[in-house]
Amino acid sequence: MRIAVVGAGGVGGGFGAALAHAGADVTFIARGAHLAAMRNEGLRIQGGRGDTHLVPTQATDDPGSVGPVDVVLFCVKLWDVESAGAHIKPMVGPDTAVIPLQNGIDAPERLIPILGPNAVMGGVAQISASIIKPGVINQVGTFMRMIFGELDGRVTPRGQALLALCLKAGFDATLSEAIITDLWMKFVGLATNAGMTAVTRQPMGRLRDDPDLRPFFISACEETIAVARASGIKLPPDALAKVLDFIGHAPPAMKASMALDLERGNRLELPWLSGKVVELGRKLGVATPTHSMLYAVLKPYVMGAPA
């Protein structure tokens, strides 16, 4: 199977390296120092699941040199969705599956006008990993899972083939018949965790059981669940309990990628996380006081560290 990974950060690099070791023909689309390091020294994944060194690593900044592939794992930051979607068109053939593995909930609907409805699937990545220096990715904890599926719920040969490859690669994978629900279930926890770890500048282990902070985790999750249901999304009746259980078992050292971006002075995905909850809440008449607070406090940093 030919796979292109667009955005070789913690998510794309982690899953891409595992799939390459399982025998897939994987090419990473990257740029700058990270691309140079992968070309010269390979891609190294270190952390909770042990060390992996992918040498040689197929990497380029030119999708046109890759040609059509079977699967694109689309892992760029949320502000780059449209530009990266147009950039990867040379890799998208009639049967190519493009699977967004970003944070947020709207990447598929933003990609469909660019790549067409047949190309775009839905995807959820559950991994805590980030680039610590060019060519090196550190994973926190051992949890690594990918959920993906056709947006209309069909089970297709391309989905089944990718599932078999993921299981061969040794990480948890699910071929979902309700990927929109899965996207929202991740979003409930992700938007909350991103806002809370960023605002406090603290890892999950110091936050989730603090009696003064836990009510904010709960209320932020409840707000997002209410927005989802007002949007017509069919979440399970025990959605809150499921999300809080996931938060409770997250690695104690975990920080959401937005918190890491804040620490590094980088641009934030805030408008598509707490900002999206607030936007939809206003549109649908759902109160979102906790996410409104998280959004307001972090908004001065949305374009990076203030001058």
Image (tube, rainbow, N blue to C red):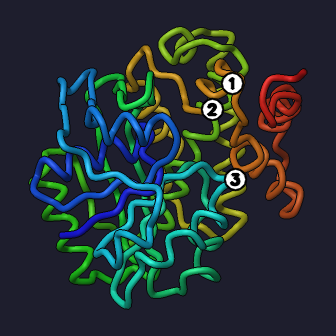
Residue 192 in the image: above or below residue 147: above
- Quarter of the view holding residue 84: bottom right
Q: Which mark is residue 120?
A: none
Q: Residue at x 74, y 40 (%)?
A: 270
Q: Earlier in the sequence, mark 3 or mark 2?
A: 3
Quadrant where the image shows the N terminus: bottom left
Mark 3, residue position: 79
Q: Is residue 38 visible?
A: yes
- Quarter of the view holding residue 43: top left
31 lies left or right of 95: right
Q: Is residue 215 visible?
A: no
Of all residues, the one furthest to the bottom in this rendering is: 94
Q: Which mark is residue 258?
A: 2
Query: Could you tell me residue 194's position as x and y percent?
Result: 62, 32
Residue 108 in the image: above or below residue 222: below
Which residue type does callout 2 highlight? Met
Question: Which type of secondary structure does the marked residue at label 2 adopt?
Answer: helix
Query: Could you tell me residue 53's position as x and y percent?
Result: 19, 32
Query: Could you tell me residue 258's position as x and y percent?
Result: 63, 32
Measured in 3D between alpha carbons, the distance from the residue under mark 1 to the one under mark 3, in whole angstroms, is 15 Å
Which residue type does callout 3 highlight? Trp
Q: Residues within 10 Å of mark 2 (few under 14, many from 20)?
A: many
Query: Could you tell me residue 184's position as x and y percent?
Result: 55, 56
Q: Residue at x 10, y 57 (%)?
A: 23
218 lies left or right of 301: left
Which residue type does callout 1 highlight? Leu
| Camera-side residue of 251 and 263 | 263
Mark 1, residue position: 262
| Camera-side residue of 14 and 216 | 14
